[in-house]
């Protein structure tokens, strides 16, 4: 194995280690900020080639992680997230190439105008600087996050979960190969070489070095990061997504969207957790929806109206309206039209993704305008809440905060801007 | 005086008071978020009319503040900031009208595209929510900040300095008149009715209620807010602005820009604090610049080369390169060309505004690309660092952070966005 995989498993001084990582990241960020597009893309393409060339290294590293996971008795869901196969590794390589193919977000002229005094003002996209990414078991985040940061001219400091440490390091080695091939600083994408939790504590307080933190994982991780980080955090804590079926819904669309939003994949943040049904149409529209969901293996927890419509429905408790199941369970509630749906979402939602099914343009506009979520949808499955599905190429996560980026965070959202003012001697009166 | 001016000067329970203010602000923000443009503008125009109608009330309130300031022996600079005259009050009214005349930033379609599956995706500007503004002596900030927040559909919670409390309340009463006239919630613009410092502490921890804090004032205020606030802060701590005079500078432009950047107004954040001169041209370009500055009453503190050029130059200490004088004092240093200038700014600057004077396009591009400041300029005075001068209509302040807004913060920067996705039944494969 190459020396870049060397791991200090027990650094005596995490603080010193992290300070050195931060120093290198800042120096790399200064180089990346003005790196030409073709050099960045060369690094990405070479990294993709390295991933393909090192498939057996990556598989061997992943087998170490898998063996440890089995020994520790991790759940099937956890080990599946951890597992790499030749197909998944090829997916990582093509994912890197897809980011290479994206337009360079740095240097974009976001706006430009000329003042009456002749000053030419342009707002130009620049990198954010140094981005810290803390993630859990999926080793592919190592590549996804690293290459998105690189494309946007940012230095990345990655901290993967201990379960996927060997896999992540093997993938990281490929990214370093790419950086070297392009003549870019190796420290452009660093991975923290220790699983000591104190390293995360350090990372979250490196103000002036780390510009932003992106946590990816479960609620426990996000909460810890949001509480401890001294710098801005881009994240979402919950994805309590709603589909509201209006009385003017097309019945077929309602069934298809409900089943897809809940059951396509139950474990993603864009999965529907609560179905709201217009009380004016519950008896007409809901039975087919419930049949289809139950046929797919979904457990339904409903209010009294919903229970009365189908004997298989269990009673919902008040906690159900605030629960992100991430499982084949759905809470279903009747509401008083679009106003009732909006009120429920305002009280119980998580400002992630909410969808209305209706053919009534007025109801649609009320919902799309008044629901205060990162993504609002009309007649579409909430499972489309994804940067790739949005055509943004790839995403580092979804933000439910309102500052800077909201919704899917892709390469464009990993930039800031500066004002470039060109004069010919103007002074202010 | 109307009841809206009633002040609880010693609330027994600041926590309860602030929670109530927060609750009202959130309720108002929900109304403002969908308020039509003409209603918001009507409130602004009515507020401007109220300012004109109540000139004598405002002057009387201001006289109370001025009398207290004189009794407390405040400096002439402080009392001048505090003073309102009929002309300054007319300026407040026309300022409000100028904001009414700006395009509504809410609802702007920032981007829109259609996916191959037919989903129509739009990124649409929405308000941020509730904005807390903490400011010091200038009472006009009450109007500036309140109306900018309103125009962008945000609820504002204002906390002015104790010195200007009476003036600020009188101006605030006019804004409330405008809100009432337009049928908007009075709580859309609230002013904290106590000078208890604990109220600020509360405001800075009202996460989930206050979306962002904008502090305006001296370094002490900004530092306290940046340290204590649990929500994002838009601000700049320092304005250590540089002008770099390159060897390829036009001598006349260099003199005019240096004098204007330093001496037009010395107390603003965009004032030049350090002049960097290319060592290849110091003896040719610097004497005229120093003459002109000294003739205007500026004290010069220079390095040894600068001292050797003019006997009136005092020696600069290492601290000078890191000092924001906000006074008629300038530090002057020779550097090794544009690279030396960039290195100095990277080490000593505050990422606010920096300008290069040169006729050499390569030097200009190097400076404009590599200097990592909110505003970079070519052949223009740093005193143009202002939202009004940028054509943004008005600004609530200048941000040197890289997240969300950088540079002047105008109405557009007081918005977030959401994604609106319109489908006709799409489900995700």
Image: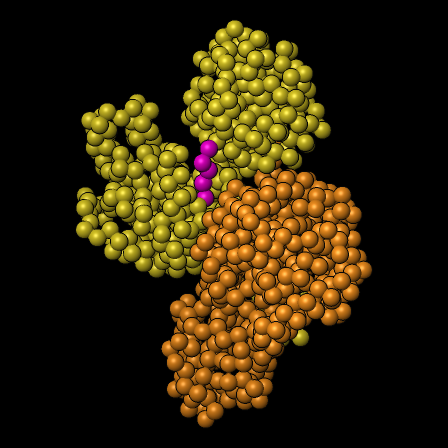
Chain colours: A orange, B yellow
Across and down, in percent, residue A258 comes to: 55, 79
Across and down, in percent, residue A40 comes to: 73, 47
Residue B414 appearing in the image:
yes
Q: Is residue A49 above or below residue B369?
A: below
Q: Residue at x 55, y 56 (%)?
A: A196
Q: Is residue A209 magenta?
A: no
Q: Is residue B35 above or below residue A263?
A: above
Q: Residue at x 63, y 42 (%)?
A: A24
Q: Residue at x 48, y 40 (%)?
A: B399
Q: Is residue B251 above or below residue A104?
A: above
Q: Is residue B237 magenta?
A: yes
Q: Residue at x 53, y 31 (%)?
A: B349
Where is the N terminus of chain A found, in terms of image quarters?
Answer: bottom right
Q: Residue furthest bottom?
A: A311
How many numbered tags mark residues here? 0
Across and down, in percent, residue A301 comes to: 45, 83
Looking at the picture, tell me which residue is in the foreground, B162 or B122.
B162
The image quadrant that residue B285 belongs to is top right
Looking at the picture, tell me which residue is in the foreground, B274 or A309.
B274
Give the left or right position of residue A256, taking residue B270 as reference.
right
Give the left or right position of residue A312, taking residue B8 as reference.
right
For the stretch drawn in magenta, the main secondary structure is loop
The image quadrant that residue A30 belongs to is top right
Residue A265 appearing in the image:
no
Looking at the picture, tell me which residue is in the foreground, A182 or A102.
A182
Region in magenta: B234-238
Q: Is residue B179 above or below residue B161?
A: below
Across and down, in percent, residue B200 comes to: 31, 46
Looking at the picture, tell me which residue is in the foreground, B211 or A158.
A158
Give the left or right position of residue B25, taking residue A56 as reference.
left
């Amino acid at each position: 194995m190459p020396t870049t995989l060397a791991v200090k498993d027990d650094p005596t001084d995490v603080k010193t280690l992290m300070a050195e990582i931060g120093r290198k990241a800042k120096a790399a960020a200064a180089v990346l900020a003005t790196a030409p597009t073709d050099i960045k893309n060369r690094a990405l393409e070479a990294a993709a080639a390295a991933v393909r060339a090192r498939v057996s290294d990556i598989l061997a590293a992943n087998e170490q992680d898998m063996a440890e996971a089995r020994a520790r008795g991790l759940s099937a869901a956890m080990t599946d997230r951890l597992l790499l196969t030749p197909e998944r590794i090829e997916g990582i390589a093509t994912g890197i190439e897809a980011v290479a193919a994206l337009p360079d977000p740095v240097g974009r002229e976001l706006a430009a105008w000329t003042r009456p005094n002749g000053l030419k003002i342009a707002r130009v996209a620049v990198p954010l600087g140094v981005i810290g990414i803390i993630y859990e078991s999926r080793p592919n985040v190592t590549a996804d996050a690293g290459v998105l940061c690189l494309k946007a001219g940012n230095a990345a400091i990655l901290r993967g979960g201990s379960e996927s440490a060997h896999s992540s390091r093997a993938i990281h080695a490929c990214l370093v190969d790419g950086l070297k091939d392009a003549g870019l600083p190796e420290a452009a994408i660093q991975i923290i070489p220790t699983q000591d939790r104190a390293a995360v504590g350090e990372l979250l307080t490196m103000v002036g070095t780390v510009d932003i933190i992106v946590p990816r994982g479960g609620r426990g991780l996000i909460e810890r990061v949001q509480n401890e980080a001294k710098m801005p955090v881009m994240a979402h804590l919950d994805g309590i997504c709603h589909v509201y079926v209006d009385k003017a819904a097309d019945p077929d669309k309602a069934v298809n969207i409900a089943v897809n939003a809940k059951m396509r994949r139950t474990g993603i943040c864009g999965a529907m957790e609560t179905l709201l049904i217009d009380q004016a149409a519950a008896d007409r529209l809901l039975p087919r929806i419930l049949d289809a969901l139950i046929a797919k293996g979904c457990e339904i927890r409903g209010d009294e109206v919903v229970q009365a419509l189908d004997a298989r429905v269990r009673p919902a408790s008040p906690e159900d309206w605030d629960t992100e199941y991430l499982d084949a369970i759905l809470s279903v509630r009747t509401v008083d039209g679009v106003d009732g749906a909006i009120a429920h979402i305002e009280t119980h939602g998580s400002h992630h993704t909410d969808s209305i099914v209706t053919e009534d343009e007025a109801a649609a506009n009320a919902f799309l305008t008044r629901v205060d979520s990162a993504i609002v949808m009309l007649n579409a499955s909430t499972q489309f809440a994804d940067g790739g599905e949005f055509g943004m190429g790839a995403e580092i996560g979804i933000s439910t905060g309102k500052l800077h980026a909201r919704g899917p965070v892709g390469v464009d959202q990993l930039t800031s801007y500066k004002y470039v003012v060109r004069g010919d001697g103007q002074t202010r009166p």
